Amino acid sequence: MKKLLGIGLLLALIAGGIGYFMYNKPHQNMENAKADVVLDARELFTAFEANETEANQKYLDKVVKVSGLVKEVSTDEEGNVSVTLESGSEMFGVICQMDNLTQHDKTDFKPGEQVTFKGICTGMLMDVVLVRCVLV
């Protein structure tokens, strides 16, 4: 019985150590992250629109470097900036949510401006969404 209790305690300590490490794991520095995929916003949107399952396999949770024209810029109540890039669709686009862990030199983008962002692709809701984006 004591042996079983000792093994259980050891496993609990190991699990606690792993949990603590994962909780305190530093975030990936997006400015220094290497892009897994480089493409145009229209190409990215078209890939998801044509076959979302296949696009998820290619782009989901990968660092994507995307270029395009600014369609719209919005700031939420917490000050987080999101830039929507033209996708060729009237209603939808590629949303690049700026990384709030990074100090940005520029956050005032104008519609029609050509930009390139690097961020993590989280898939398509109605728009294709990239999070933790930084301007390249």
Image (cartoon, rainbow, N blue to C red):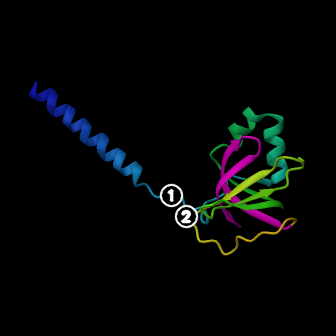
- Disc ID at residue 101: 2
Please tell me which residue is depicted at 41% across the width and 49% down the height of the picture. 22
Amino acid, disc 1: His
Q: CA distance from mark 2 to mark 1?
A: 9 Å
**Closer to the camera: disc 2 or disc 1?**
2
Residue sitting nearer the eye, 48 or 90:
90
Examine the image and state in which quarter residue 78 appears: bottom right
Quadrant containing the C terminus is bottom right
Q: Quadrant of the N terminus?
A: top left
Q: Amino acid at mark 2?
A: Leu
Q: Is residue 64 above or below residue 48?
A: below
Highlighted magenta segment, given as a residue range: 113-136
Mark 1, other Cα within 10 Å: few <14 / some 14–19 / many ≥20:
few
Q: Residue at x 55, y 64 (%)?
A: 101
**Numbered tag placed on residue 135 in the rendering:** none
Please state the horizontal and vertical placement of residue 95, each as a whole percent of the image.
74, 53
Where 44 falls versus 3 (above or below)? below
As for residue 132 lying within the magenta part, the answer is yes
32 lies left or right of 126: left
Q: Which residue is mark 1?
A: 27
Q: Secondary structure at mark 2?
A: loop
- Residue 57: x and y, percent? 69, 37
Q: Please, what secondary structure does the residue beneath circle 1 have?
A: loop
* Left or right of residue 52: residue 69: right
Choose top left, top right, bottom left or bottom right for residue 16: top left
Q: Magenta span: helix, strand or loop, mainly?
A: strand
Q: Are marks 2 and 1 in contact (CB under 8 Å)?
A: yes
Query: Is residue 35 found inside the magenta-colored segment of the image?
Result: no
Question: Looking at the image, which is closer to me, 125 or 31?
Answer: 125
| Sequence-earlier tag: 2 or 1 | 1
